[in-house]
Amino acid sequence: MSGVNYVTKETLEQMKSELNILKTKGRAEIARAISEAREKGDLKENAEYDAAKEAQGLHEAKIATLENAIANARIVEADSIDTSKVSILCKVTITNVANKKTFTYQLVSETEADLKAGKISVTSPIGKGLLGKAVGEVAEVLAPNGKINFKIEKITA
């Protein structure tokens, strides 16, 4: 992930905590698994060893991704959010023009996105469509199943 990653202070702290756990406990567990597999004999035909080494590679990739996200993180405070138009960290109440269903989402960075918690990424189709819109405007969103129109009902911090 490149570019600026806008997050809340709490999210940045969670990311740092997760990184610390991955670097300490996570690496120790992987090293232990590699050591145990190595003790079982010939490394050329040792599937356990291969799996442990692959897990190590995936673990290190996850650490690198998280380090990059933290390095590019910029903290955005809730009180500094402009609610005249939809922007990152705004809570937006929208109505689907076709079926009249109303939803409230908070626009967040990719790392914070969690649909179950009502947080959608600003890089998602809906997020992209809503950015920059004001209350009363209709956002046309290009979704995989076609165009969807959402009316902006309310924007809050």
Image: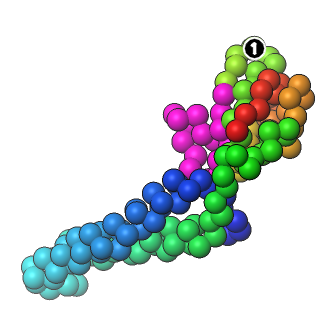
- Secondary structure of residue under mark 1: loop
Q: Circle 1 sits on which residue?
A: 100
Asked if residue 114 shows in the view, the reply is: yes
Residue at the location (30% across, 73% down)? 24
Residue 13 image offset from top left, x and y in percent: 48, 60
How many circles with numbers are drawn on the protein? 1
Residue 116 image offset from top left, x and y in percent: 51, 34
Residue at the location (80% across, 44% down)? 82
Residue 47 image offset from top left, x and y in percent: 22, 72
Residue at the location (51% across, 72% down)? 67
Residue at the location (70% across, 16% down)? 101
Q: Residue furthest front?
A: 79
Residue bounds of the magenta highlight: 104-121
- Splitting the image into 4 quarters, where does residue 119 fall? top right
> 75 above or below 84?
below
Q: Is residue 39 magenta?
A: no
- Splitting the image into 4 quarters, where does residue 29 fall? bottom left
